[in-house]
Structure formats: C-alpha cells, structure tokens
Image (cartoon, coloured by chain):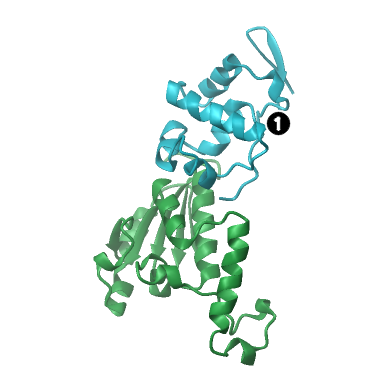
Chain colours: A green, B cyan
Amino acid sequence: MENNNGKIRKMMIILSKGTLENVYAAFVLANGARMEGIEAEMFFTFFGLEAIHKKKLEHLHVATVGNPAMHMPTMLGGLPGMESLASIMMKKEMEKIDMPDVHEFLDILSASGVKLWACKLAMDMFHYKKEDLYEGVDAIITVGDFYKQSEGEGVHMLMV
Amino acid sequence: MNASIAGKEFTVNEEGYLTDFNQWNEQIGESIAAGANITLTPRHWEVIKYLQNEHKSQVALSIRRVGKSGVVDIKEFYALFPNAPLKTATKIAGVPKPASCI
C-alpha cells in the first residue's frame, strides 16, 4: 500500500440526525472535501435518512429544545410552532450567505461526485423504500458495505 | 515569489496564485494548467474567461455560483478541472483563490 504522508484522500461522513444544523454540517463537510480534491461518501442512517427522504427533506427543522446554543428557555422552545419559526429564521439567514436549500445541496453533492448511501437497517426500521429517497442516492447498503467502501490509506471517518 | 514563462516575469503567492491579474496572459494560464496535468480546450477557456469576468465584477466565487452560471454545470466543472476545480480553475485564470466553503 502506498504511503500518502498523512494526506486525506477520502472522507466518510455518517449522518445520523435529521436536524437542519446537523444536515448542513454534514453537507458542507462533504462538499468542502470535494472542493479540495478529496473524495467524499455519505452514509445516512437513523434520522439522518430524513435528509434524503423526498417528502421530508424540505421540512427539516433546527432543534429548539435541548439545544443550549439557541439561548432559548427549554419551556419556550417546546411551544407549538417554535421549531418552525426558528427554522424559517435560520433558512433566511442561510439564503443571505448563498447557502442552497437541502434539495439543491443534494444536487450539488451528487454532481460533485459525492457517493450517497442509505443505511439498510434504518430503511427497514422506518419502512422506507428506495423510491421514497432522493433520486441521486447511489444505493441502500449495510454497515459492512460502508466499511468496505472505507478501505485504504488516507481515509477518514466522521460522525455527524 | 517571482516566476517567469516565455521571458515574461510575474509574481505568485506561496500557493502559486498570481498576485496581480494584470500580469496574466494565456501562456501563463497554459503553463499553470500543465502543472496540474490539464490540457486546455475551448471549453476550459470559456470557463476561465467566465471566472475572470466574475473576478472583474468583484463577485465572490463559489461552486454553487459557477453551477448556476449557465457557462458550465457542476458535473462538467469537476470533469474539466479534476481535483479541486474552483481552486485549480481560478489559479489558471490568474484570479485569487476564492475563500468559499460552498
């Protein structure tokens, strides 16, 4: 095996959460890797599947409860409509800095050559089918398949 | 850092980007491209000219913006300039490296 002197060759990014901030963090990391000439693959598991579920990906929210960085009292964050309000405000800010929405971001990732994998176990658990998913998803694979994809020098794994 | 191609002197920063776009010419662009193992075709030149025009209009460049330009889509952009297309293409075009995360 060749010695790559510590260079990052590929990023394997696991997304297990469906909150807007986690989804964007994972997307920015994957896209940022490709922009630097680093390969990137994403594994969507558990609530991370929401980010590639056709009907759900447009309706992701930021977490207003249990998120101290929101600087909002927990009781207030739990009020009806609070998550929607916070999400609308966040999406407005994102548009200002030229951040694409979730669907467009998936298009960018797909066109940039990021591999998009859905976790088989989580798909079964949520009773999702391939046709429920964003069309750019490469395949539904097992965790074993994902490890297989991660073989080689200079591969780093990250859980978001 | 000074560099010279075909007798013409120009200055680059530590990453190899021209520090003054006025020093740029097509030969310099071709030479930087050759360093990245890219042979420039008319399609490459269309993208390079677009990047230079955007730079002149002081537009902040990003992959998303390039993809929406109508000049090239993201897939082709990656195909034309493999390995870090925005960084490589701006270097060839003689414009500064975009400080963009998207």
**The disc numbered 1 marks a residue on which chain?**
B
Q: Quadrant of the N terminus of chain A?
A: top left
> Which residue is at 38% across, 52% downward?
A151
Q: Where residue B35 sits: x, y (%)?
A: 54, 23
Q: Image height check: is A46 above or below A5?
A: below
Of residues B34 and A23, the one drawn nearer to the viewer in this rendering:
A23
Q: Where residue B69 sits: x, y (%)?
A: 50, 40
Q: Tell me: A147 left or right of A139.
A: right
Q: Can residue B37 be seen?
A: no
**Toward which corner of the image does residue A54 lie, by quadrant?**
bottom left
Residue under label 1, please give it: B14
Amino acid type of the residue tagged 1 in the rendering: Glu
> Which residue is at 58% across, 85% downward?
A65
Of residues A30 and A79, the one drawn nearer to the viewer in this rendering:
A79
> Which residue is at 30% across, 79% downward?
A125
**Toward which corner of the image does residue B93 lie, by quadrant?**
top right
Other-residue count near label 1 (Cα within 10 Å), few / some / many at <14 / 14–19 / ≥20 = few
Q: Give the structural element (helix, strand or loop) at label 1.
A: loop
> Which residue is at 57% across, 89% downward?
A78
Q: Image height check: is A131 above or below A85?
A: above
Of residues A78 and A6, the one drawn nearer to the viewer in this rendering:
A78
Q: Tell me: A110 left or right of A160.
A: left
Q: Where residue A50 sits: x, y (%)?
A: 40, 71
**Toward which corner of the image does residue B25 lie, by quadrant?**
top right
Q: Image height check: is A137 above or below A45?
A: above
Q: Can residue B14 be seen?
A: yes
